[in-house]
Structures are given as C-alpha cells and as structure tokens.
Image: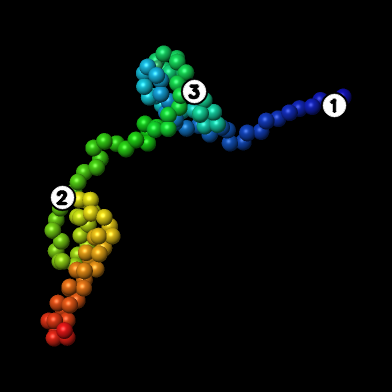
Amino acid sequence: MAAVSTFKLNLRGSPVGPRAYACPDHGDFELDVDLATSAEPRPCPDCGQPSDRTLAAPLYKPQRGTLVRGKVEPPRRPTDFNTEGLADGKPLHELLDDRAAMWRDHDRARDKRKGLA
Ligand SMILES: [Zn+2]
C-alpha cells in the first residue's frame, strides 16, 4: 500500500493585522491577529476575559487636535474662488449659485464699462 501524504500548502502565510477588541472591564485593546480568525474573541491582556472584536479600531480613529482652522485671508479679487462659506456650513450648491450670480454681475459691469449694455 502506497503511503499517502497530505500537504497543506500556504505559500504566503496567513495575513496578520492589527484589530481592536473590547474587554468588558478594561476597555479597548489592540492585537496583531490572524485575519482569518480575527472575528473570534481574544483574551484581554489584563484579565484574560474573552473580549469581542470592535469595529471602531483605535488605529483608525481620527487623531484629536489635527483639525486646525486656517487663517482667513480675504480674496484679492471678487472673482477669486473663496471657500470660506463652506467652512461656515454653507452648502456647496449655494456657493456655486452665488459664484454664478457674481460672474453674471461681473460680466454685466464689464459690458457696461465697454458701453455694450
Ligand atoms: Zn480585561
């Protein structure tokens, strides 16, 4: 009888990556885990309790304090694109409507100067 060998070929290895888990007592922690089994609970490093994976990985949380509102400089010409209104919550379509109106007035004034209107 011929010997039968079985092979499990895994050329690239299991992908490993950081995932976040939450201990009911100690809160969030992060582990480098085999991504194929990352959905399974992991023991908390402090108490060993099985801890469920959380979707809000600390790794992906935006860092606090990185959003800095820039200095506002007045546009040099009225036709310069000024996005200051967007920063104050104005919807984009309103900004674009205002710009279209600004250009209409701008062109009308230019035509008037040239005696065309
Ligand atoms: Zn714990």
The correct choice, above or below, for 37 with respect to 47 in the image is below
Whole-percent x, y for residue 55 in the image: 42, 32
Assess disc 3: are there few (<14), some (14-19) or many (≥20) residues with their C-alpha within 10 Å of its C-alpha.
some
Whole-percent x, y for residue 108 in the image: 17, 77
Q: Tell me the quadrant of ligand 1.
A: top left
Residue that numbered label 2 is attached to: 71
Whole-percent x, y for residue 79 in the image: 19, 67
User: What kind of element bears circle 1?
Assistant: loop
Tell me the quarter of the picture where residue 74 sits.
bottom left
Disc 1 to disc 2, C-alpha distance: 80 Å
Name the residue at the bottom extreme. 115
Name the residue at the right extreme. 1
Decide: marks 3, 2 in contact (CB < 8 A)?
A: no
* Viewer-side label of 3, 2: 3
Q: Amino acid at mark 3?
A: Pro
Disc 3 to disc 2, C-alpha distance: 47 Å
